[in-house]
Structures are given as structure tokens and as C-alpha cells.
Image (cartoon, helix red, strand yellow):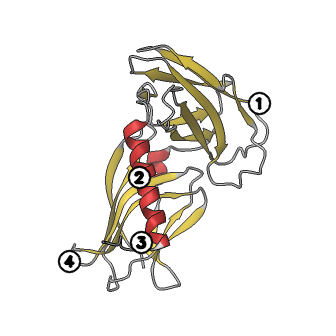
Amino acid sequence: MTTSPLIHPVARRLMAWGALILAMIICSPAQADITFDGFSRFIFEGSQKQLPVIIVNQSDEPALVQVKLDWGDKPPIAALPMAVTKPLLLIPANGKASTGILYQGLGLPDDRESFLMLKVLQVPKRTTDSNAMALALQHNLKLFYRPALPGSIGDAVNQLQWSNSPGGGYEARNDSPYYLTLTEVSVRDRSGATCGQVIDHLMIAPFSTYPLSASGCEKPAGQVAYAYISDAGLPHPRQSTFKF
């Protein structure tokens, strides 16, 4: 007579979760492939009454999507002064549909950009298979409300200041009214070698300072290399010198 080995309760739960995740991956119906007509972020200019948002369905099946807005950097309990004109869209196969973002001109500051998130949820297709589990896919896109402001994103990046911070690290100071999105931020020593950890992504709010941890870098550091993201969503490599 053979006896089965005992399985620890924690291991049993992990195995069950693993089986569930595998079933969701294997059995879930295919999601509609949607894009946003070439946009990866949206700029709502203060001169606009409404921001159009076009959603393209590249699938051979219709797609049902839910569109909503949320704050990008504020507690979700704060009331949103914007609204979506069509929060639910049925997009035909290989077709497109449009919705819009409305703002009445009250509730957002007029001396700086405001950051929101446009959230587009692909509603999974209902299945008759009782063993299948559907996965909903949500797209999160940055939306910036931009009132009439002096200068441009390029000007703001040119004025970005990199320096020592009182805590012993480094900091980036944004004195502009624009949000600055940076990627692949790396501090370099005097020889030009990268030191510390490369930051994949960071966003510096208007009129604010962003602290950088550069452990492993011996001061004084030489330069910082990064790429800023333009309104078109494209990276533009830059290199700046630290000021001490």
C-alpha cells in the first residue's frame, strides 16, 4: 500500500491559484485589438470646447468599450470638472467610433497644466462555455488639460534644473507650468559612466521638485541623460549638466 505525500495548505492554495491563472489565459476569449488613431496621450487645449477621442477597432469582431475619466495625481474622491460625452461605445469590426471630453471652463487651474487619466475598458465578449473565464483589458492614457500658457514643452525641458539635494542625493526642479515626462533617466559620473539605478519613467509636476536617489554615485556627478516625451508621445534624448 502506498501513501500520497501530504501537501502543505499554502502550497495547495498556490497550486490552485496557478491552475486558475492558467485557465484564464487558455480559456478567455480573444480581446478586440483597439488603438487610439495614433495617439498615446491627449492634450486638451484651453481654447477647445471639446476634445475628440477616436477609438479604432482592428479586430474582425465588434468591440464594446467603456470610457471614463479619473484624476491622474489627486485622490479619486475629488470631483471631476470634465465629462465623457459617450461613456459606452460599440465599435464595429475593423471600424472606428468617437467620443469626446467636455470641460465647461471651471474647476481646473489656469496657470498650469492639469493631469488626468483616460481609462478605456474593453468589455469581454460573453461566452457560453461555463469553464471559460473572460479577462477585461483596460487602456490607461494620460490626458493633460493645458490652458493658455507661456512657452512650450520644449522650453520647459530646456529650463529644467538638475542639482544637489540637501539630503545627499540629486533633484530635478521644474519651474514651468507644464508636466514633464522623462524616461531612461541615468546619472553619470565625471568619466561619463552611468552610476546608480536607471529610472525607467518619472513625471515632474508643474512648479515642483523631484528627488533622485543616486546611491553608488560619487559626488560630484557630471551629467544626467534622459529622454523627454513630447506631446506626440515620442521620446527625445537629452543630456544635462548638474549644477552645484
Q: Tell me if residue 111 comes above or below residue 174 in the rendering.
A: above
Crowding at mark 2 (Cα within 10 Å: few <14, some 14-19, many 20+): few
Q: What is the C-alpha distance between the residues marked 4 and 1? A: 53 Å
Specify which label sits upstream in the sequence, 1 or 3: 3
Q: Say whether residue 158 is visible.
A: no
Q: Which residue is label 1 attached to?
A: 104
Determine the CA span between mark 1 and mark 3.
Answer: 61 Å
Please state which amino acid type lies under the numbered disc 4. Ser
SS class of the residue under badge 2?
helix
Find numbered disc 3 in the image and state the secondary structure of the residue it sits on.
loop
Q: Which mark is residue 206?
A: none
Mark 4 or 1, nearer chain start: 1
Q: CA distance from mark 2 to mark 3?
A: 16 Å
Q: Residue at x 65, y 33 (%)?
A: 46
Question: Disc 2 marks which residue?
Answer: 19
Disc 3 marks a residue whose amino acid type is Ile
Q: What residue did someone put label 3 on?
A: 7
- Cα separation between marks 3 and 4: 56 Å
| Quarter placement of the C terminus | bottom left
The residue labelled by disc 4 is 191
First-in-chain label (3 vs 4): 3
Observer-nearest residue: 99 or 178?
A: 99
Mark 1: secondary structure: loop
Give the Cα distance between marks 2 and 4.
Answer: 51 Å
Residue at the image position 50 percent from the left and 79 percent from the top: 165
Which three-letter amino acid code belongs to the residue tagged 2?
Ala
Question: Does residue 17 appear anywhere in the picture?
Answer: yes
Q: Can you say whether 46 is above or below 158 in the image?
A: above
Of marks 1 and 2, the one in the foreground = 2
Nearer to us of marks 1 and 3 is 3
The residue closer to the viewer here, 131 or 230, is 131
